[in-house]
Image (cartoon, rainbow, N blue to C red):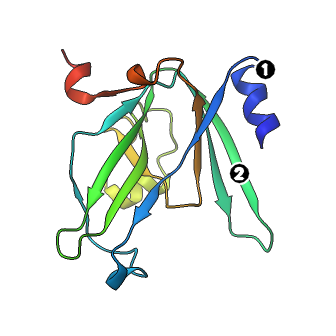
Amino acid sequence: MLDFVQGFMGERTQIEALSTTTHFSEEHSTTPLQNYTILDVPQEVAAPKMVACHMMPCAYTVFYCHYSIGDKRKVFKVSLGNEANGDRVEAIAVCHFDTSEWSPSHASFQVLGISPGTSPVCHFFPSGNDLAWVPKTIDAGHEVRSLEERST
């Protein structure tokens, strides 16, 4: 996986893996399927290149990895919470802003009831299973920008 990621990013590029993490309260530590609310403004991760690796349902650990370049998608860190029990999730989400070239039969369009090119499609990476590899930023203070900062 690292060879694939480094080959795409460039041999001299420092990389980091982002993943979704959960913080379940002790009482509800085994209930990941629940309703969550976005707690803060999502933070954009500066990522001109990205490799997404998704764990496949196999007998052994197998990842399907694919890459993306450009501004047709953005990576975000999103803080989610469940007010009822205090559970929190620090999620990684990828939003695709141009879906016009996607197949009309793509599962996202079926679930959302939309057509290609009509709306952005965002998906959250499940906890502990999927990784978003991005170039590591030299100055961590400039690594993420909020949506509000981006628009000013």
Residue appearing at x 69%, y 69% in the figure: 57
Give amino acid for label 2. Answer: Tyr
Q: Does label 2 or label 1 sit earlier along the sequence?
A: 1
Give amino acid for label 1. Answer: Glu
Instruction: Say what secondary structure mark 1 lies in.
Output: loop
Residue appearing at x 82%, y 35% in the figure: 3
In this rendering, does residue 110 appear at all?
yes
Q: Residues within 10 Å of mark 1 (few under 14, many from 20)?
A: few
**Relative vertical location of residue 138 with respect to residue 44 in this rendering, above or below:** above
Q: Distance between the residues labelled 2 and 1?
A: 21 Å
Instruction: Say what secondary structure mark 2 lies in.
Output: strand
| The label number, if any, that marks residue 114 in the structure image | none
**Relative vertical location of residue 80 with respect to residue 135 in this rendering, above or below:** below
For the residue pair 90 and 69, the one nearer the viewer reads as: 90
Where's residue 92, x and y in %? 44, 47
Residue appearing at x 58%, y 31% in the figure: 134
Residue appearing at x 36%, y 80% in the figure: 26
Q: Nearer the viewer, mark 2 or mark 1?
A: 1
**Relative vertical location of residue 119 with respect to residue 124 in this rendering, above or below:** above
| The label number, if any, that marks residue 64 in the structure image | 2
Where's residue 83, x and y in %? 17, 68
Q: How many marks?
A: 2
Where's residue 71, x and y in %? 45, 21
| The label number, if any, that marks residue 11 in the structure image | 1
Where's residue 33, x and y in %? 37, 75
Left or right: 47 with respect to 152? right
Where, by quadrant of the figure, is residue 40 drawn? Answer: top left
Where, by quadrant of the figure, is residue 7 drawn? Answer: top right
Q: In which quarter of the image is the N terminus?
A: top right
Left or right: 100 with respect to 133? left
For the residue pair 139 and 116, the one nearer the viewer reads as: 139
Q: Residues within 10 Å of mark 2 (few under 14, many from 20)?
A: few
